[in-house]
Image: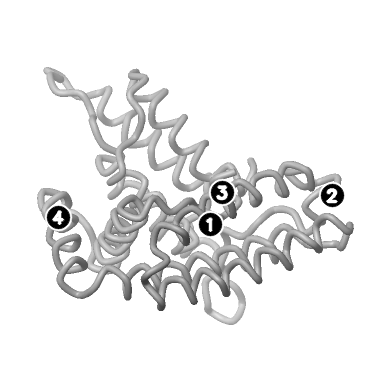
Amino acid sequence: MNYFNYFTEIEEEFVKRRGSHMLVSPLDWSLMESWKQRGVPLHIVLRGINSSFDSYDKRSGRIRKVNSLLYCQQEVELMFVQYGESRVGSSGEPVVEGQPETENGAGGKDSPFTIGSVVDYLNEQREALELISRKHAAEAALTETLNRIFLRLDQILDDLRTGKNLPAENLETDLTMIEEVLLDGLRESAGEARLAELKKEAAGQLRSYRQTMESAVYDQTLNNLIARKLREQYQVPRLSLFYL
């Protein structure tokens, strides 16, 4: 089970159990991102999905199909709590998981990626960011943010091309930090009024699920959905290796 296939494996399992080839929605993606950010292990999510559908399949008089991954949310959360309780260490603190399974370089024998595939991926994303930079050249703050990002991406690409050992986990951490810097720049560029509109839209999409979600899960999913809408507005690509 590959850490970097987190989203793909969840999506495939959900689609398989649902019995439909319709892809998961942006709302479902936001929920998946919240699980990843909170360190919910992949096997726990898959187990929760299967348990949810096993219960659904046993129900009589089923009419409506399951249309959202949020149907499985409560079961995943329950299994995550049980998993944490079963993994309590000697210090009394739960063992935190959800980290990459490999510590070799991007092209190492245990890595899910080759150096070439990562370089190609980051080059494509850099080119997409350059288009955004030209489109928003009049926005000084966003331009300055993008220039900082270009410098860091170029350093990473140089290291990869020259064969410097970059553990996949460290590379993912760098790319996630770059994404956060970029997201901060997008928020500043969008302005408070637009952010309020996006929050209202996202909250509306989550309204029917809010009562079944814990506060922390709801807040994380809401923030992820707002960020997703903001990226879509600016047509910003993802840099994380999870999207490779």
Residue hosting label 1: 130
Residue hosting label 2: 108
Q: From what the image shows, is residue 228 above or below residue 94?
A: above
* SS state under label 2: loop
* Label 2, label 3: how far apart the Cα atoms are: 17 Å
Q: Choose mark 4 or mark 2, whichever is in front.
A: 4
Which amino acid is tagged 2? Gly
Which amino acid is tagged 1? Glu
| Earlier sequence position, callout 4 versus callout 3 | 4
Q: From what the image shows, is residue 128 above or below residue 166?
A: above
Q: Going by the image, does 53 lie left or right of 197? A: right
For this orientation, the residue located farthest to the right is 163
Which amino acid is tagged 3? Phe
**Circle 1 residues within 10 Å: few <14, some 14–19, many ≥20:** some
Residue hosting label 3: 242
| Residue at 31% across, 58% down | 230
* Label 1, label 3: how far apart the Cα atoms are: 22 Å
| Earlier sequence position, callout 2 versus callout 1 | 2
Q: Going by the image, does 202 lie left or right of 173? A: left
**Circle 3 residues within 10 Å: few <14, some 14–19, many ≥20:** few
| Earlier sequence position, callout 4 versus callout 2 | 2
Residue hosting label 4: 201
Q: Choose mark 1 or mark 4, whichever is in front.
A: 1
Which amino acid is tagged 4? Glu
| Earlier sequence position, callout 1 versus callout 3 | 1
